[in-house]
Amino acid sequence: MHRTTRGLALIVATVALLCTGCSDATVANVPTLRGSYALRTVDSLPLPFLQWEYDFTRQYLIADTLAFDGRHTVQHVTVTRLDSIGRSYSEFHRQSYSSDYRLRGDTVDFMFRCPPNADCALPPVAWLEPDYTLVYGYRKYPNGFWRLSLYQRVR
């Protein structure tokens, strides 16, 4: 009996050691996304894209990029131009922020931080096409998407 218990203990120790080695490999195999994507179209319209118009002012989306670092963080950089209608006044604005993302197959879920008790919109979602085009959109309640944007991989 003593020999069987010793053999069983050796088998259990070997399996435990193998499983410990496997745990690092499974962490390394978490799906990720790396690279930069530049906006090409919004709702099938090319840039510059008219985002809004109010009285004598128009805002255009000039450029937009998403840079995925491969560690579940994305840097989002947007350039807009504000034009004064009827006057020759124009100004550019650059906004940059980072957020977290998760990859589920070909779907990219953007993590969204909504303050407690705030009325926040649903976070955007994206998916990768086979040609590495990134389709980005905002969820529409109860289903569907609006403002579908196409991003092309640039590096």
Image (cartoon, grey):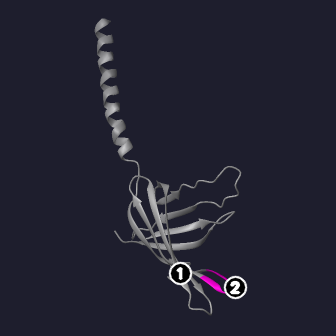
Extreme top residue here? 1
Mark 2 nearby-residue class (10 Å; few <14, some 14–19, many ≥20): few
Name the mark on residue 59.
none
Extreme bottom residue here? 86
Across and down, in percent, residue 33 comes to 40, 58
Q: Which residue is mark 2?
A: 55
Characterize the magenta stretch by its predominant secondary structure. strand
Whichever of callouts 2 and 1 sits on the residue coming sooner in the sequence is 2
Figure quadrant of residue 9: top left
Q: Name the kind of residue labelled 2 in the image.
A: Asp
Tag 2 secondary structure: loop
Looking at the rendered image, the disc whose residue lies closer to the viewer, 2 or 1, is: 1
Residue 141, compared with residue 29, is above or below; it is below
Q: Residue at x 40, y 48 (%)?
A: 30
Residue 44, compared with residue 97, is above or below; it is below
Residue 87, compared with residue 36, is above or below; it is below
Whole-angstrom CA distance, mark 2 to mark 1, is: 17 Å
Q: Residue at x 33, y 11 (%)?
A: 5
Range of the magenta residues?
52-58
Across and down, in percent, residue 135 comes to 49, 69
**From the image, which quarter does the C terminus lie in?**
bottom left
Q: Residue at x 71, y 51 (%)?
A: 117
Mark 1 nearby-residue class (10 Å; few <14, some 14–19, many ≥20): few
Across and down, in percent, residue 27 comes to 38, 42
Name the mark on residue 91.
1
